[in-house]
Amino acid sequence: MTGLILKRGATVMNSTFLNDALVYLAAAIIFVPIAKRIGMGSVLGYLIGGIIIGPFFLGFVGGEGKDVMHFAEFGVVLMLFLIGLELEPSHFWRMRHLILGTGTLQIGLTTLLLLALFLILGFSWPAALACGLALSMSSTAIVLQTLREKGLSQTQSEKSSFAVLLFQDISVIPILAALPLLAFSPVQPGSGEHATLLEGLPGWAQTLALLGAVALVIAAGRFFIVPFLRFVARLRLQELFTASALFIVIATASIMSLVGLSPALGTFLAGVVLAQRVPS
């Protein structure tokens, strides 16, 4: 029995996942404090650590690194869901001029400049427009984390940055819905984890499906999820409420993935819909 336990323990310790986890954590422990020390911020520390241990530098981890991406994506999904829960609908209305003005200016100018650049480089106008729209977007998770680390979370700069990020998150929906219309022929069906239910459909059908998925998330949040969570809250079982919230997050992310939208965007929308409607 002792020999079996030792053998099983050795097998676990030799597993690729645990070895990779040790490498990831060691890189974070080493490079994040260094980045903080020289004023770069923890986000850049994580990025630099990932680059150094990755297959293009030291090669401590290779193609199997894609396996950990699921955990990283889930972290971003949870964070944006919590951000959505913290936002008050009235807060959007008070910031409407800043959101529409600053956000429209940023996306519009950036897209036009990049569109002109890609046209000069010889891209077709649909490809140039798609590249311009894609590169005009920012990472909400990285920007908000950086602002908080720099102590700028309550400044005018943070409000302006948040307005731009919020407008980007909102504009992603119509942009992704319109992108299939730029294709001259239906997208060929994919395979594997990157395939979606919409691949191979005409552009107009993909657009309707994307808008329908967003409407489904909003309607489900308002008419089904809110009453369900209120029922769970009345049971006063914290673990059940936590499990229900995780189920909602994962289900929303799965729906968004099936139609090719960002899972983080879907959970952000769900968080906003649930804000102020569910007991804390």
Image: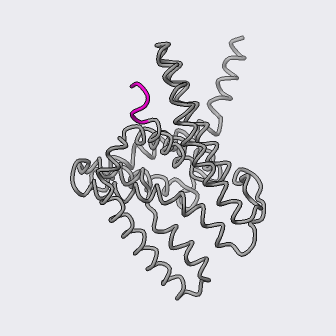
Residue 279 covered by magenta stretch: yes
Segment colored magenta: 275-280
Of residues 214 and 77, the one nearer the viewer is: 214
Residue 223 covered by magenta stretch: no
Residue 237 higher or lower than 123, as above or below: above
Of residues 39 and 206, the one nearer the viewer is: 206
Kindly indicate the quadrant of the structure image that contains residue 202. Answer: bottom right
Residue 47 higher or lower than 186, as above or below: above
Colour theme:
one colour
Q: Position of residue 271 (x, y in %)?
A: 46, 39
| Identity of the residue drawn at 46% across and 13% down | 236
Q: Where is residue 117 in the image (x, y as percent from the top left)?
A: 48, 83
Kindly indicate the quadrant of the structure image that contains residue 67. Answer: top right
Residue 272 higher or lower than 37, as above or below: above
- Relative to residue 7, is residue 256 drawn left or right? left
Q: Where is residue 262 in the image (x, y as percent from the top left)?
A: 57, 52
- Relative to residue 160, is residue 256 drawn left or right? right
Query: Residue extending furthest top?
Result: 1
| Identity of the residue drawn at 58% across and 58% down | 55
Kindly indicate the quadrant of the structure image that contains residue 247. Answer: top right
- The prevailing secondary structure element of the residues shown in magenta is loop
| Identity of the residue drawn at 55% across and 86% down | 121
For the N terminus, the image quarter is top right
